[in-house]
Image (cartoon, grey):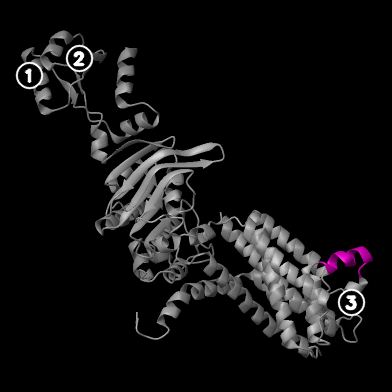
Amino acid sequence: MAAIEAVDLVVRYGSTVAVDGLSLSVDPGEVVALLGPNGAGKTSTVESLEGYRRPAGGRVRVLGLDPRTDRVRLVPRIGVMLQRGGVYPAMTARQVLALFAAFYPDPEDPEELIARVGLRGVDRTPWRRLSGGEQQRLSLALALVGRPEVAFLDEPTAGVDPAGRIAIREVVRDLGAAGRSVLLTTHDLEEAERVAHRVVIVAGGKVVAVGTPTELMAAGSRSIRFGAPPGLDRAGLAEVMGAAVFEEQPGEYRVDAPADPAAVARLTAWLAEKNLPLADLRAGRHTLEDVFLQLTSGRSVAETDRERSRRR
Amino acid sequence: MTEAAPGAGMRTAFRPVVAQARAEVGMTLRRGDSLLLALGIPVLLLVFFSVVDVLPTGTRHPVDFLAPGILSLAVMSTAMVSLGIATGFERSYGVLKRLGTTPLGRPALLAAKTTAVLVVEVLQTAVLVPVAVGLGWRPGGDAGLAVAAALLGTVAFAGIGMLMAGTLRAEATLAGANGLYLVLLLLGGMVVPLAKLPGALRAVSRALPAAALSGALSGGLGTGHVVAHDWIVLAAWALGAPAAAALSFRWE
């Protein structure tokens, strides 16, 4: 059974559709990043799973329970980190962790948790005087104090300094390693790549791609790009490669063949035969950023490539 | 955890409420503005107008009129102003939202807030009654009636405070609760006897919970008799205000 499941989820605010038929699932022990630009429907999705929003359509289940009707049974087993706020401004990390610990049957030790998220030095400072990054770390600690089986983290590293980011990511990865499920939202690609087993890319309230970071980056690797002297015999090369060859800019070529070693070998052999120099061979691999930008702007990698070649 | 110990289950069930109530009392007593409201202003008004006999109290000693009035003020300040403002800010800080996904739950949160209000009121009484007695007040009548009236008043004022906290922006609740506090202080028979108000104003104030509470407390702690009108007004507010709050409350 999936730990977290949304099927055809629809969330509306008045006439605005925030989430438009979104489906996703998170397995036990899996860390999944919901990646997308602002306004993509990430928070609405997470808040539906947390039971804050009533879906206008579709179905959400967490640990097999309905977040709204089974709230009392569900909340002891989940941990929530809101996008912002959520803590009494006058309370210190110690006080608020001790308070929240009293809500759960088998809580974590607040002292140990303070050390784990790196708040040792400021554990007696009121929330309102903590830096943005320290507040985020305390929010994370509060999400974990009840030893949740499932954690929802809405932009856990937003506004956090680099050291804090590293600390938070480590805590998140440990959760997955300990068999807990994590659904986090982010618009930071690097973060998704570093902490998530799987990435769900959303735009306009819909899922536009799902996969491991590696799979997503490989999705665009249906071409080989290389630099060589301008004016190559493209027809000849196309015959050898068994694929179309484009000169995207003078001296920059694209072969629409799968970027496997055999194809690369045929290309280099052909160039060697003709005694041509080879500059900067790139076997397809897009960065996650390429994939993300193309997907979230509503066009596939292939479409963008076609447009690029048409323009030339 | 010692599962076998008798009462362990009960203690576990009440642990969240007790922890939350303690946190609520602690925050109230550590905030300067709420201490001023809970104790500073009531003590100041009680002492000043008991010693400086300028109010048209109609009693031989001003403290005989003032003591029940100031006790009513104490109830109003804690149940309506302090509770309303604190809850309004908790809502705007997202604290109420965040508590919504803990096992505390809304009924337990309300129970904790109620407990905290009652604890602060007991502390206020423990300070104000000795001060009033020191100023020459001799309470009589029926303490049971006074407690019943204070409880009804607490529910009514808490309902008004929560109604504001759940519907207005925090800053508007802050301004509104303080403004209402001043109006009800003047119209509520707490420092100025209702008899001194002009006819139309008196009619309005007799329909408000402040005058009903001060009337009931002064009756209960004086002659030992509370007029039916005061009970009816208090009961109506104690039912209506929390119901309105419950129906309109926005947690985010």
Residue at position x 84%, y 85% from top? B64
In this rendering, would B127 be left or right of A176?
A: right
Instruction: Give the Cα separation between the discs numbered 2 and 3.
Output: 100 Å
Dot 3: what SS?
A: loop
Q: Which residue is mark 1?
A: A269
Question: Which label is found at residue A181?
Answer: none
Mark 1 vs mark 2, foreground winner is: 2
Dot 1: what SS?
A: helix
Locate residue A288, reporting x and y percent: 30, 35
Question: Which label is found at residue A244?
Answer: 2
Q: Quadrant of residue A42?
A: top left
> Relative to B114, is B140 above or below?
below
**Residue nearest the viewer, comparing A185 with B234:** B234
Locate residue A6, reporting x and y percent: 38, 46
In this rendering, would A291 be left or right of B251?
A: left
**Chain ID of residue with mark 2:** A
The magenta region covers: B197-207
Residue at position x 50%, y 55% from top? A85
In this rendering, would B233 be left or right of A25?
A: right
Locate residue A10, reporting x and y percent: 45, 41
Locate residue A119, reporting x and y percent: 39, 63
Instruction: Give the Cα separation between the discs numbered 1 and 3.
Output: 108 Å
- Locate the C terminus of chain A and report the quarter of the image it occupies: top left
Amino acid type at mark 1: Ala
